[in-house]
Image: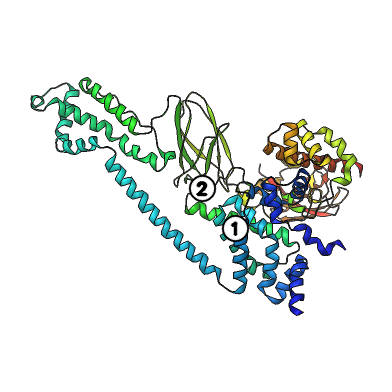
Amino acid sequence: MPQKHNHINHRVDPDLIRRYLAGELDNKAMHALERQAMDDPFLAEALEGFENHAPDQRRHLADLENRLALRVKGTVTRKVIALQYRWAAAAAILIVLGVGGLWIWKKDAQPGGLAKMEKDQSSESVITDTLSYANMTGERPVANSTSPVTVEKGYRATQMADSPVPEAALPAMAPVMSAPPVPAAPLPVTAAADQATMAMADSTEVAEKPSVNTRVLQGRVKDLSNNGLAGASVSVEGSKAGALTDQKGNFAIKVDSAKDVSIVVAAVGYKAKKMAVPSRENNVDIAIKENRSALEEVTVTGRSQKDVYQAPVPGEGYEAYRQYLSKNVKYPASAQATNVRGRVRVSFRVLPDGTLEDFKVTRKLQPDCDAEAIRVVKEGPAWLPASDGKATRVQVDVPFNP
Amino acid sequence: MAEFLHHNIMKDADDATLVLEYKRSGKLDYLAALYQRYMNLVYGVCLRYFDAETSKDVVMQIFEELIAKLQQHEVQNFKSWLHVLTRNHCLMKLRSMKNRENREISIEGLPVMENDQFGHHENGTSMESHLQGMEKCLETLPEEQKRSVDLFFLKEKSYREVADITGYDMKKVKSYIQNGKRNLKICMEQQNASEA
């Protein structure tokens, strides 16, 4: 009896998988394994997993055998795992501190001369600010002559450099998050304009300079209740560009500035969403729906498609049946008099030949309505019997809403 | 002698026997012997979702889950059941990771597995037995699916060979074959239904 050695067929030699992935098998053996995977979703999924990794997983598998053996002997692996979590937490804290420190250091270091200037000017900036404001309004106060022009220029430059600089430090950590330097509003003072353009050019260079024909598309992925979704993948259709969202659901991707693109958003447990983004649009918010079935689909059933049970249905479908009901229900005079409205639930059996019998009212409304509900169902369209060929009880709600 | 017999059971008994032995005795040896048979598959499935190190931890966590769950559940087909347990475990873990941190895995092409696939753990001969009906149905398939299915199932070519012969991309070949197979199945079921 082959049944006895069934499991031998079910097991797949790890070495066979390794050789398959490494391309060491001949075509015939490859085909055999592929056929097996076709009938064995477990194997198919495992193969898919292996495919994205180095073909030789022998070291890891041996390690697993070891850990399993240790576990059986009574060495508590749980502790080991817990310990590893602790180490991981410690490592994470160190990394955060490290990156944070780096960031602060960079922030200090990068602006260089500009930052210094900012410091030097900080005491005067209040004055110059009022000055330039005064310039704008056109009233040149006498004080202007006491304040050297260079100071104002210098301050302008600092002001310009001010906004892009913190962003300039960012690309080192999270290129995905970096926004293109936002050009400041045009300066009203023409005297400072040249200086300003220069400062702007400088700061653009410090930040990642976008090439001429790309733009940064940024946005946020959220669920329907407006919570940002971390770790959602956002990809540009037809290209390799893509990004994962950060903790708050934000993302940024470089795309061709001239083209309309279409982006695809996917996250575990959510329905993937495709969205067209026209070339002028650089900011998108995308809400995606939860997909309960994706996570809950994993119930095993031993049934094939054709065994799927189909309950009795009205011959022309439920929609047509509802229309029939609403058209043919006669609102009883007694109910009209007392202004009764609501639903009557009628229960009946659909026999294998499609005929109906044994009518009962399982939710009453008013005696005349109840009787009318039974009449209308009894005289109504034919029903398709249940797929298993058995008489089956069905309930229908008959509305009385004049 | 007893040692030898014991060893023999671990190696040669079928899954159901080992499940029973484990339930009866509660000894981890039996469960481990059983788990060992599929550990590489469990690990492979984990690799779909996590890196190698995490996957190994998850494989061990699944074993811990098995220790408890197998005692509570009536398991008919251990392998299918383990597959589902594995996926559920991975998905739950992914879900909790999602809330905890920014993870670095690609979630593209995550399982769009159909339910009916779970029904076919027995090594199927279902396809071959309907060859004639199949040929008719084969004609109804789109060209790419038809060629791929024909080469794979009838000419017994491997994915790589099919890709070489047709010039289709390897990834596409796989989906052509899978979709083709599903379409064939639907077509043949309709045929059977109309004959009956």
Quadrant of the image for the N terminus of chain A?
A: bottom right
| Three-letter residue code for mark 1 | His
- The answer to whether residue A104 shows anywhere in this view is yes
Question: Residue beneath label 1, please?
Answer: A60
Labels 1 and 2 share a subunit:
no
Question: Residue beneath label 2, please?
Answer: B104
On the rendered structure, is A262 left or right of A183?
A: right
Q: Which of A159 and A345 is in front in this view?
A: A159
Residue B173 numbered tag: none
What is the total number of numbered labels drawn onto the structure image?
A: 2
Q: In this view, does A159 lie above or below B98?
A: above
Label 2: which secondary element: loop
Write the residue at 15% across / 29% down: A151
Report in which chain the residue with disc 1 lies: A
Write the residue at 56% across / 52% down: B50
Q: Is residue A348 above or below residue A66?
A: above
**Residue B81: % across, % down:** 70, 60
Q: Which of A241 and A260 is in front in this view?
A: A241
**Residue A316: % across, % down:** 79, 39
| Three-letter residue code for mark 2 | Glu
Label 1: which secondary element: helix
Quadrant of the image for the C terminus of chain A?
A: top right
Q: Is residue A269 above or below residue A283?
A: below
| Crowd rating for badge 1 (residues with CA inside 10 Å; few <14, some 14–19, many 20+) | some
| Crowd rating for badge 2 (residues with CA inside 10 Å; few <14, some 14–19, many 20+) | few
Q: Which of marks 1 and 2 is in front?
A: 1
**Residue A23: % across, % down:** 69, 45
Report in which chain the residue with disc 2 lies: B
On the rendered structure, is A5 left or right of A217?
A: right
On the rendered structure, is A175 left or right of A381?
A: left
